[in-house]
Image (spheres, rainbow, N blue to C red):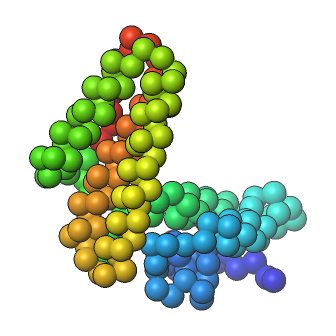
Amino acid sequence: MKLHTSRYIYKTLAQSPYYNLILGDIALNHNYDINTLQLKKHFLNKQKLYHPDAQTGKSDEEAAHALQTSSLVNKAYETLLHPLSRAVYILELNGIEIGEADSVEDPDLLMEILDLREQLEEATSEDQVQSLRETNKEAINSTINDVSAAFQNENYEDAKNLTIKLRYLTNLDTAAKDWQPGAPVILQH
């Protein structure tokens, strides 16, 4: 397959949805639910085409465009691979932004998140943290299923709120991974 490296081709790739960039024609509907093994297979095939190491003997311009395209393919893959970034991306495709200031509007959910954070801060052993992570992982998986259903029903307002919830739960999981006895628990937003 011939490598297309003109500025026009790169600009077209940069403007195409990540789904199309990685998956090509099989990604016509931009579903939230994707087969990550298939995604990885297509990603690796794209990288074979555009990876800078595969550009030996090419002109400097072709190598530069291949590097840009390779970076774009990497970004697309990382975005689509993770449920949270994929949800944010699909919302963006539909004109809905989630900013850092967007927070949980459901008071019950906010209390749940604060309670989980407090449990993490008060944990004194790895076993307690592991138990909290398992509970949180169940909540993450349930929320991912809810996000999927919201996208399938094209209910983007629910998808946005659930994505914000998923962000909090994911950040809590990250904080639990980084947990140290007696250290403050900091949740990123």
Quick check: 77 left or right of 180? right
| Percent coordinates x, y for residue 167 in the rendering | 34, 49
Examine the image and state in which quarter residue 113 appears. Answer: top left
Q: Is residue 153 above or below residue 38?
A: below
x 81%, y 64%: residue = 55
For the C terminus, which image quadrant? top left
Quick check: 183 left or right of 95? right
Q: Is residue 28 above or below residue 18?
A: below
Examine the image and state in which quarter residue 181 appears. Answer: top left
Which residue is nearer to you in this view: 104 or 137?
A: 137
| Percent coordinates x, y for residue 61 in the rendering | 69, 66
Examine the image and state in which quarter residue 119 appears. Answer: top left
For the N terminus, which image quadrant? bottom right
x 58%, y 76%: residue = 21
x 46%, y 37%: residue = 133
Quick check: 27 left or right of 164? right
- Report whether residue 96 is seen: no
| Percent coordinates x, y for residue 16 in the rendering | 49, 78
Residue extending furthest toward the right? 57
Which residue is nearer to you in this view: 186 or 15?
A: 186
| Percent coordinates x, y for residue 114 in the rendering | 23, 34
x 82%, y 63%: residue = 54
Which residue is nearer to you in this view: 96 or 134?
A: 134
